Image (cartoon, rainbow, N blue to C red):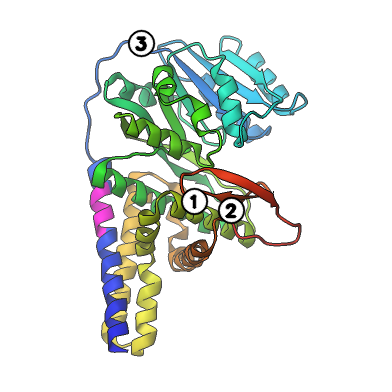
Amino acid sequence: MFIIIIILVGCVIAANAFHLLALYAAAKFFLTRTASPQIECQPASVLIPLAAADLSVYQNYARLCRQQYPCPYQLVFCVRDQNDPAISLINTLKENFPDADIEIVKHPSINSANPKISNLQRMLERVKYEQLIIVDGRFRVREDFLSTIVEPLAERQVGMVTTLYRNSEAPDFNAKIEALEMPELAIAVLLARLAKGLDFALGTVIVTTKSILQLIGDFESISNHFSEAFSLGNLVARAGYEVRLVNYPVEKPLPLLTFTEMLRRQIRRRRVLRRLRPAGFFVWALNYGVPLAVLVCVVVGFSASSLMLLAATLLIRWLTVWMIGVQWMRDTVLQKPLWLLPWRDAVSLLAWCAALFSNRIEWDGQVFKLQSDGSFTETGRREEGKPGSG
């Protein structure tokens, strides 16, 4: 029992050190001012995989039409169904912004295992400019988005630019639990940046050039990969270029979620992480200092020293999330549900444990088996009524 207590206490101390190191990595990123290079005008093509056909997403597209960008730029959309209601949404966008360069590609065929990659490859045939920006249509940007996000590509060593995200809406209890994952993602990315620099990109925003994309084999090189952003960034880094993280968090609204849906999303992300970054997956366990500190209290009978350790762990965990999420990333959604952190950690630990035992993931009702190189094979569809696990 003494050895078990020593191991548990050591794990809690390691978790606290992990979060203090994360605070250092975050401070180094958010508080460091970089000089803006003097660059010539860089026309850009923005590729937007269509996410939905509702008013909230339309407002996201409208913001892209209102960019304060001094250079020409185009917006390229893609649909696979000729009757997709998103087509009328884009037509309305064209009517409301007649001066905007907007093109919609109707692409009914799927040429790769990943439909999004198939769409992007077809969209690539219609782009006009060297600078490429891929942005998920669900994310919200400000009117200075293009002028900020394209700028780092002026540096010759930079081959790709990516960003973090912050929450903009969390309409129910389960969505608030989901929102608390944002600081954990930021911690993982910032620590990777501190350790050796990024060799991956995030699915929020990807900025690169046609030349670099051709160098790594275009989108076809990752046609059967599940996490296309990660794989693209990895290929760019392996080609000798820097993947630059910029301090421009885009905004992500969360939908209404049942507990099962929320848990399934958590498990899927952790299984993807375990296959792509096994070491990172086990380092992720250092986020669970609070549940481990509670376990120490139970084992030793809630002694004064164990309660002090729990209090210190709670404080460090809360401080890390507050500083990174609320203070530095300006995530207003996180201001109120911080008291949910212990519950969030318990759910996250459950998802982490579930991710240990399978390579099966679910996406839009389909079931896939994920390989260690990021590729996947479809194995079927989830049966209705079953909660699933990914």
Residue 24 on the magenta segment: yes
Mark sitting on residue 272? 1
Q: Secondary structure at mark 3?
A: loop
Q: Earlier in the sequence, mark 3 or mark 1?
A: 3
- Residue 308, above or below 91: below
Give the position of the N terminus as an image quadrant: bottom left
Q: Earlier in the sequence, mark 2 or mark 1?
A: 1
Residue 258 is left or right of residue 184, and the answer is: right
Q: What x and y, as percent, mark residue 313?
A: 31, 69
Q: Which residue is mark 3?
A: 41
Magenta-drawn segment = 20-25
Q: Nearer the viewer, residue 207 or 119?
A: 119
Q: What x and y, as percent, mark residue 17?
A: 24, 63
Q: Nearer the viewer, residue 372 or 169?
A: 372
Disc 2 marks a residue whose amino acid type is Ile
Badge 2 local density, few (<14 within 10 Å), some, or many (20+)?
A: many
Q: Which residue is mark 2?
A: 361
> Magenta part mainly helix, strand or loop?
helix
Q: Earlier in the sequence, mark 2 or mark 3?
A: 3
